[in-house]
Amino acid sequence: MPPLVFSRWHLSTAPALLTWILLLNIGNGNACKRGVPRLRLSYKDLLRSNSSRLLLGSGDGLAFQSFLVDETRAWLMVGAKNHIFLLHLDRPNEEPQKVFWPARKEQVERCRLAGKNAETECANFIRLLQPFNRSHVFACGTGSYQPICAFVQLGARAQEPGGSPIQLVANSVESGRGKCPFSPHEPFTGLLIDGELYSGTSSDFMGSSAAFFRTRVHKAAQNYIRTEQNQDHWLNEPVFIGAYLIPDTHNAHDDKVYVFLRETALEAGQWERRRIHARVARVCKNDVGGKRGLINRWSTFLKARLVCSIPGPQASETHFDQLEDVFLLRTRDPQSPLVFGLFTVSSGIFSGSAVCVYSMAAVRAAFSGPFAHKEGADYRWVEYKGRIPYPRPGTCPSETYDPLLHSTKDFPDDLISFMRNHQLMWGPVYPLGRKPILVRVNVPYRLRQLLVDRVETESGHYDVLFLGTDEGKVLKVGLTGGRGQDSEEISLEEISVSKVLSPILDMQFSPKRQELFVSSTHGLVQLSLYRCELYGKDCTDCCLARDPYCTWDGKGCSPYRLTEKRRARCQDALKADPVSQCQDTTAGEDR
């Protein structure tokens, strides 16, 4: 009998097929337990619930793509097509203030002649709103494929009735190249820190070249630092998702900006198909560029792979590599936030979405590990085992590590030479528990937006995920019992926030107001974080809902506040036991 021979296709595909079957079981078999939401509301149902309000209608396809929330002064700034709106949240019936900021007519005409759509592309779509100081906001728009930026002045007492309206500071208008994308459809990120804008965006009309920049926003001189051009090992067809300033030590000179993106992976191997990998990259905040080959280039730029996968049989893994959104959950330790990543996967076998959570300890461990390196006759990627220059590549110049280094321009020549060719770390970053906390496969939607709220309850903290879909729905999912083997997922709500099917473009929190702002091409909706009264009219229904925002107060299912004086209530989202809990509340009423 001849030996069994397996083709390359069988060897690579069989484990994937088995994993796919497991994923379908996750997506379907447990649907009755955790996939079916406690509440499912259509758009009409939502309006009748009195827990939402349409803040702005779609109008002329305004495409509300950027938000800025000021909780202290209770206003919401919204960027749209040719407009910036300012809404006063404490005065819901007041007409919003607005700035009309169109692209120049000649640029609109050039955009049309280049073959772009006159309605959906040839306009000034406001993509960036960042606070500059108490009186000004820095704003950038696509400018009909010629990006422009300017300051928006809030005006004296703009938050008060009768206060001065917002206005565009005309003499502040400047080029937005390297600060804002050319296209209204391109994902990008922008973060303003101490008058400097960190931005990941395309740098040309065609969108064929993208980089991570830092530019000064209020200086006449356009000083900048960026990733190297035309060097695929720095960045290869990147799509930028988010950027955050995270301190590494108690010394501010060690602060780093962490950037989240996805890109085409060079290290996937020449025999593999084109692969997308999710990345976390970082630069030192005090990086002023290097010398010689790194003038006006980052001298501390490093990147590592973010892994979000489901282990399968025979040591196979199903990877969710298409990073869609990132949320940073701040903790009591400013150096140790949790990173929530939303990923998707699409193949000929299946499509789906997943959420993974990463600790900063795991991220820093990857950047402290070995570097990746190309060598050998076939020039393949391997672990670098040569001499590492001093100071270690990626180290910020500060007295924490070397009191003699005052600037990145003081880095020695061997370090500069090393940093020109060694951006990639060898070891990836794995999530907590080495698996996703949420998986959705074999469903009619894709997840696109992610927000996380940590709710403190009497029985501990409880993370609530708000997920925006490409069908105009918001999913509310609770996570209890930590992120280990005993974690539990509770699907609480599925809400349609638009009359027609359209992707959720952006979502922002107002934790102080317990509200969520959700935008699509068809409008901007203000949504309460809870709809307690819809869970039912008795204690049992309220308790079984296991919504951390809600509790039975003796008369009805009502919003829960940890600071309230304890009355008769049941509120234990971690373990619902309506028999004992509702008996306790009855006893409380009798007392």
Image (cartoon, rainbow, N blue to C red):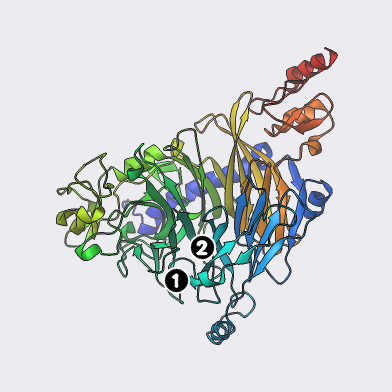
Residue shown at 74% from the left, 17% from the top: 580
In this view, the residue in front, 119 or 151, is: 151
Mark 2 Cα-neighbour bin, 10 Å: few <14, some 14–19, many ≥20 = some
Residue 40 versus residue 520 in the image, above or below: above
Residue shown at 76% from the left, 20% from the top: 567
Residue 87 numbered mark, or none: none
**Percent position (x, y) of residue 511?**
63, 41
Judge from the rendering whether residue 113 lies leftward or rightward of residue 551; answer left or right: left
Judge from the rendering whether residue 290 lies leftward or rightward of residue 483; answer left or right: left
Residue carrying label 1: 177
Using the rendered view, name the quadrant where residue 266 is placed. bottom left
**Percent position (x, y) of residue 53?**
77, 52
Cα separation between marks 1 and 2: 15 Å
Residue 187 numbered mark, or none: 2
Question: Could you tell me if residue 27 is visible in this image?
Answer: yes
Question: Could you tell me if residue 421 is visible in this image?
Answer: no
Mark 1 Cα-neighbour bin, 10 Å: few <14, some 14–19, many ≥20 = many
**Percent position (x, y) of residue 464?**
61, 39
Using the rendered view, name the quadrant where residue 530 is placed. top right
